[in-house]
Image: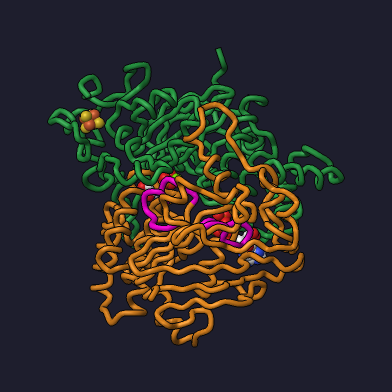
Chain colours: A orange, B green
Amino acid sequence: MSLLSVQDLRTYFHTRNGIYRAVDGVSFDLDAGETLGIVGESGSGKSVTCYSLMGLIPSPPGRIESGKALFDGVDLLNCTPKEARSIRGKRISMIFQDPMTSLNPYMRISDQLIEPLMIHEDITKADALKRALEMLDAVGINDASSRIHYYPHEFSGGMRQRVMIAMALITKPELLIADEPTTALDVTVQAQILELIQKMQQEIGMGVIFITHDLGVVSGLCDRVQVMYGGRIVETADTRSLFYHPKHPYTRALQKSIPSMQPKGTELYTIEGLPPDVSKPQAGCSFAPRCEFANEGCTSDRKPELQDINETHRQSCLRVQSGEL
Amino acid sequence: MPETILELQDLKTHFPIYKGVLLKREIGKVKAVDGVNLKVEQGEVLGLVGESGCGKSTLARTVMQLVHTTAGNVELEGRNLTHSSPAEMLEIRRDLQMIFQDPYASLNPRSTVFATLAEPLLVHKVCTQKEVHARVGELMETVGLAPRFMQKYPHEFSGGQRQRIAIARALALRPKVVLADEPVSALDVSIQAQILNLLAELVKKMGLSLIFIAHDLSVVKHISDRVAVMYLGKIVELGTAEQVIENPIHPYTKALVSAIPTANPDDERNRKRIMLPGDPPSPINPPAGCAFHPRCPYATDECKATVPALETFAEREVSCLRKADI
Ligand SMILES: Nc1ncnc2c1ncn2[C@@H]1O[C@H](COP(=O)(O)OP(=O)(O)OP(=O)(O)O)[C@@H](O)[C@H]1O
Ligand SMILES: Nc1ncnc2c1ncn2[C@@H]1O[C@H](COP(=O)(O)OP(=O)(O)OP(=O)(O)O)[C@@H](O)[C@H]1O
Ligand code: SF4
Ligand SMILES: [Mg+2]
Ligand SMILES: [Mg+2]
């Protein structure tokens, strides 16, 4: 049985400018000990997918319209507040994209770090502080014993991000949702953090959902990758297939945009056009207006669905499905 | 000879550390920036990289006069910023802009995108009330945001979209120098490419100068003419992007370059990184001698005692005592 099973998740924002379909029919499974990468267009619904699982969608304007998210038999989207509290923050934790907005600026790092332990575990403050110090050490903050009493603004961007990571790992969760956890870290510290996550994965069988724009990190860390565009998953595959045999035109275009693959000083490849307006229902494939392979069939009424290419690889391009690409 | 537009002279920014609640007493200093000399030419892109916490953002914030300068000078086109009055600084901000590392914290949550972008245009009288709507729309399009989002608030955007608002705001006044603190790390590779192309075009066409802080060395190499590597408040290597990233000499730069992830699963799983032993050092009690010596695979006894100077070597500047042997 999988650790987490998300089925047909739809999260919409009802704003004065219309209904914004931020996540529009997302399904995936994650096994214990597995690392799933989520990549894709900025604004494609990666964070909103995870916020939905964590019960953090601001409502109004947000609303989970449909879907299930089964974690150890409990549907995270429809469970009692009591069940939710016993799971979130303890068995599932999340590292947020904006460290400054998720750390409380008026609270010392020490108090924020021990908070989840004090809530979820029967532990003395002294023991909690000891665990907090060990965790700060593990994420590579030097002088942890004096710096633990700092306020967030006294840390550099990367140090704040590591505090967030320490906070998420301190309860030894079964599922870690990491939303761009290493973007503010230099590559050597990043490598250290990724190793720490992998180590905890081996020790406690933690499942990891890892959102990032860094395709290099994905290629080294993830077992599987799924690519999002316009609120939907357009391709999902084991990491090697996705990098060596990408099928969906959006995935291919994304790969072509990586700077290290292009000569210095030249204009970088970009995907023409603007992201889709998910407040207006669009016929056919949402990537069609920007796709270099699009033809009439792509904007017909047929809504693209994920289809198997083989056991581990699924994608939703209509032309790939009909064998034309 | 291209002209120097921005010059930092022996710049230092130290943060005092206090102990005690009622009777505060200073028990030490975080030497976040500790003696940086740097010249940026007109139309040049200088990449600034280095370990998390080494002082990159503080350096940028010191140039912007957002934190108190402990010592040294910042000169923009010959004007000394460290002695400027607030009124002069306001005028200077037109030429000198910063894109902040944390876009959410730097945007006013109660202002729509339109208000955020229109404000600098109107304050500095770049355009009239009538034109402002069109100008804001243009600005949004240059950073890949649809103008239909104009009346939205920051919290209604994704992380990458917010970052583009911050970039648009910094570019609104067509400044001469932009300090960009991790401007593209929150963006997907295609939008990242779009912003990099935009910045490169502004550099080429308008002679914009750019200090580009980033952790992604392949991005830094792509956009930068020269690259400066910082470690613990000091520059340890400075040279052309190719020299520094393809053929690094300082042991810290070597470790950094060896850890660049590549988008190739097989290579990525088989490669050898230079692992740095030990923790990043403390900027409160920096190690004696070469600050990198406790983690350096090449360190000798001399490195523990002698502070290396930044010296010209192999067509670049590098501060390592063993530069000729390694
Ligand atoms: N509170 C909100 N109100 C209205 N729209 C919202 C709100 N929060 C998010 N959205 C919209 O939902 C869409 C998905 O946002 P999300 O944060 O999931 O993107 P993302 O894939 O994580 O992007 P990024 O890579 O830039 O972080 C965005 O277009 C955003 O504008
Ligand atoms: N206001 C402050 N008070 C005390 N210390 C500070 C303050 N701001 C920064 N520091 C310290 O100065 C050092 C340099 O911080 P800075 O933010 O410049 O690093 P950085 O190189 O930008 O790192 P990152 O890559 O993680 O963003 C850090 O040790 C940080 O803790
Ligand atoms: S001076 Fe010595 S310790 Fe410092 S980088 Fe060079 S070899 Fe390593
Ligand atoms: Mg996001
Ligand atoms: Mg910084």
Q: Check the image and report above or below for B237 versus B144.
A: above
Q: Residue at x 57, y 27 (%)?
A: A266
Q: Is residue B323 magenta?
A: no
Q: Quadrant of residue B303?
A: top left
Task: Name the spot of residue A19 as percent of width and height, x first.
Answer: 72, 68
Residue B159 in view here: no
Left or right: residue B21 compared with residue A270: left
Q: Residue at x 38, y 53 (%)?
A: A159
Task: Name the spot of residue B199 as percent of width and height, x first.
Answer: 61, 34
Nearer to the camera, B36 or A224: A224
Residue closest to the far right: B130
Nearer to the camera, B242 or A260: A260
Q: Is residue A233 magenta?
A: yes
Residue closest to the far left: B301
Q: Quadrant of residue B112?
A: bottom right
Residue closest to the far front: A323
Task: Name the spot of residue B22 as percent of width and height, x first.
Answer: 36, 63
Left or right: residue A5 compared with residue B169: left
Residue A192 in view here: yes
Q: Check the image and report above or below for B40 versus A140.
A: above
Q: Residue at x 43, y 23 (%)?
A: B240
Q: Check the image and report above or below for A13 versus A271.
A: below
> Which of the image's four quarters has the C terminus of chain B?
top left
Q: Quadrant of residue A147?
A: bottom left
* The residue stretch that appears in magenta: A213-236
Nearer to the camera, B22 or B153: B153
Q: Residue at x 43, y 37 (%)?
A: B217
Task: Name the spot of residue B157 as percent of width and height, x first.
Answer: 63, 58
> Which of the image's four quarters has the N terminus of chain B?
top right
